[in-house]
Image (cartoon, coloured by chain):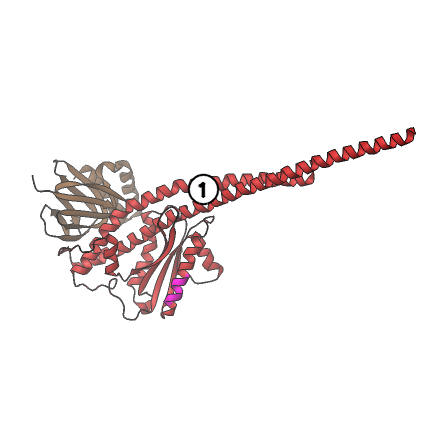
Chain colours: A brown, B red
Amino acid sequence: MAAELHVELVAADRSVWSGEATLVVARTTSGDIGVMPGHQPLLGVLESGPVTIRTSEGGTVVAAVHGGFLSFADNKLSLLAEIAELADEIDVQRAERALERAKSEANAAAERRAEVRLRAVTGS
Amino acid sequence: MGAQLRVYKRRIRSVTATKKITKAMEMIAASRIVKAQRQVAASTPYATELTRAVTAVATGSNTKHPLTTEAETATRAAVLLITSDRGLAGGYSSNAIKAAERLTERLRGEGKEVDTYIVGRKGLAYFSFRERKVADSWTGFTDSPSYADAKAVAAPLIEAVSKETAEGGVDELHIVFTEFVSMMTQNPVDDRMLPLSLDKAVEETGAKGEILPLFDFEPSAEDVLDALLPRYVESRIYNALLQSAASEHAARRRAMKSATDNAGELIKNLSRLANAARQAEITQEISEIVGGSAALADATAGSDK
């Protein structure tokens, strides 16, 4: 059996995704961080950004995460976020509209949120 | 129809209409409890993980943070009271208010000034009627609170806690809400949120005896704690709001159920009285007719002779 870790992606009001994974990449305040099985216990603060989870079946799950943190211990990774959406839950048109609106209102936080959503969908 | 009977009929009609309304409210509340309970359950994983993480940082590092260390002489405290926006929920709001009053009394006894923060129109009405000072209040979301609402409530509280006491900040943060135990039992409880007492946090997660690993902090323990504690307060307030919403619906359901039962009882008694009045009327009419015809018969019999 390939080494794998258990991932729980939890938003404030629901559990978004949980399962086994071989690699998780997330953005902390001091830069992107990759967590693989057997990583040392870690607690980090997350930035608004996409989280990429490589599942043990070989698939990839991408989620847009806004504000939160990750904790890793005993081969169990918890990603906690105030808002978390899986890429296929994101409404692209709505995010695009939100981006336009945020740009016109010069609302930096909203603009960043919309950008993260769009990036999670396109995977770039 | 006699006057008495008409009065009874009218009262029965009005009570029946009221009964229909209370019955509808009871059923609406019953369906909402289930939804509210589901929301409480959905928010639990986040709260559990968060408490675990907070405990891990606070025990695993030697960082001193204003939110985890108790001030030697606490002089000011904030109390957040959660009530409902609407009435007709039995003693739900007044019980929560009473619990807050007891807590305030106790804190004053310990020589602390108390700032009151209120969620819900009922609590606000109670305080403004008595012309008492309220530091801040929020209304309009008590029956289905969202996380954004909890954030809005938490923001000024966190700000007050992080400020120096001399500049109008507070040393302690208490919350009063109604705990949802079961469909039949809801208890108003008061709880100290900050400074964080670790034993209690550990108890809540049920992680007693579990040895937490030595964490590596990214970027640093202080920064992690700085980011974590506001989230912790928000999540606690969110949980309290959700539990209060579930309790509110349960209290309303119970109040409306007894109102419906009482209305049914009233209708039964009134229809008995109405029946008796109708029967009395009939009896009276018969005796009048019989008496009248007897008098007539007597009169004719007298004139014949």
Q: Residue furthest left?
A: A1
Whether residue B104 appears in magenta in the rendering, the answer is yes
Query: Would you say B287 lies left or right of B102 here?
Result: right
Residue beneath the point at 63% across and 37% down: B275
Quarter location, residue B112: bottom left
Query: Would you say B221 lies left or right of B4 here?
Result: left
- Quarter of the rendering occupied by the N terminus of chain B: top right
Q: Is residue B63 visible?
A: yes
**Mark 1: which amino acid?**
Glu
Q: Residue furthest right?
A: B305
Residue beneath the point at 25% across and 57% down: B201
- Quarter of the rendering occupied by the C terminus of chain B: top right
- Relative to residue B134, is residue A77 depicted above or below? above
- Relative to residue B11, is residue B56 depicted above or below? below
Mark 1 crowd level (few <14, some 14–19, many ≥20, 10 Å Cα): many
Nearer to me, B298 or B251:
B298
Nearer to me, B199 or B161:
B199
Residue B121, position in %: x, y?
Answer: 44, 52
Query: Would you say B90 lies left or right of A23 here?
Result: right
Residue A64, position in %: x, y?
Answer: 22, 43
Quarter location, residue B153: bottom left
Q: Which residues are magenta?
A: B101-107
Q: Is residue A119 visible?
A: no
SS category of the residue bearing label 1:
helix
The secondary structure that most of the magenta stretch takes on is helix
Q: Chain of mark 1?
A: B
Nearer to me, B283 or B160:
B283
Whether residue A101 appears in magenta in the rendering, the answer is no
Residue A71, position in %: x, y?
Answer: 17, 51
Residue beneath the point at 38% across and 51% down: B186
For mark 1, what is the residue? B26
